[in-house]
Amino acid sequence: MAEQLSAELKSFLVDRYPYLLRGDVRQVNNILLRWRLITEYIGHNGLRFGHFLHIPKTGGTTLAHELERGAETQLISVDAPWDRFLGQLSHLKSDSSCSLITRAHHIFPQVINAGGASAARFVFSIYRKSSEVHVSNINMIHRRILRFKADPDGQPADVRAFSLHWLGLLEADGVEVRETKDTAIAIAASDAYVSQMGGIYGRYFSDCPLEEVNKVYFISTEETDDILTTVLGMDRPPARRNTAQSGALQVEDLRQSVIDRLVGDDERIETMIQDRLSSPEDLRRVWQKELLPMSG
């Protein structure tokens, strides 16, 4: 990978993080190190950035894709595979008028503790009801396992690892994965799923100081398309990525007792988020104020 890096990034790494050029696996997945590297290198290039706190299954994949491919935006995925992460840093344009955004599935306390939240000019996230988040996630897990079982050798390495992980957990919990909606319902009700994924908003925000959470611009998932048009200036939003397929699990298919287990203590946090939702126009204003002046 080192030979594919820009001369500027390679010089920066040689000076400050030479061991990273050797691909030390103990370091490349270190969240604190990645954020330190990003904030130092972005500062080295005299840039400002905003951070997209990407909560899984909220509809943020389409937004992230457009940020990465947009002509007026640059995206660094902090949790991307190491080669891709370094590649995005390597292509950073310090003389560009592009808005720079970082994104990751890292929970907010990790971003705060690593210095990412304080270094970012603003933080934004997409909010979706937690019951809908879980249904979307369960459908994704179910689909991936079915594809893996049908063609184990034909799946990418990350999908194989993901499928084997969940297949092992679910089978140990007595869930036999079949191509039926009943299987998806069983996944939702399983101890394996609840222990790994229950209380998604609690995982992301319960250990954060309230004043930090209050700084986040939360946009409702229903307004994601408006972010693309209002903030990014697209004429029309693209088709949503990772959308549910016909026959997939719906919230209405689950008993209330199952939903209550999935949501856990999220109701308090969700109420707080709902009470202070921002609009795409709010995000556009802070985006222009904090990022675009640097282009001049």
Image (cartoon, rainbow, N blue to C red):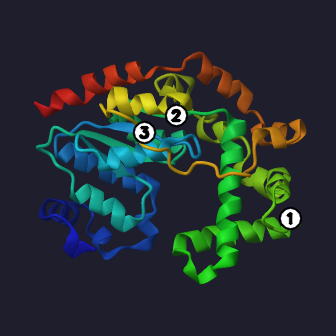
Residue 251: x and y in percent read 77, 39
- Determine the secondary structure under disc 1: loop
Distance between mark 1 and mark 3 Cα atoms: 35 Å
Q: Which residue is mark 1?
A: 173
- Determine the secondary structure under disc 2: strand
144 lies above or below 201: below
Does residue 36 show up? Answer: yes
Q: Which amino acid is tagged 1?
A: Asp
Tell me if 26 is positioned left or right of 36 in this view. right
Does residue 121 show up? Answer: no
Q: Nearer the viewer, mark 2 or mark 1?
A: 2
- Which quadrant of the figure has residue 258? top right
Q: Which amino acid is tagged 3?
A: Phe
Mark found first going from the N terminus, 2 or 1 = 2
Mark found first going from the N terminus, 1 or 3 = 3
Q: Residue at x 81, y 38 (%)?
A: 252
63 lies above or below 271: below
Distance between mark 2 and mark 3 Cα atoms: 9 Å
Q: Which residue is mark 3?
A: 52
- Which quadrant of the figure has residue 85? bottom left
Q: Residue at x 55, y 32 (%)?
A: 221
Give the camera-side residue of 193 and 11. 193
Distance between mark 2 and mark 1 Cα atoms: 32 Å
Q: Which amino acid is tagged 2?
A: Ile
Q: Which residue is mark 2?
A: 126
Residue 68: x and y in percent read 33, 49
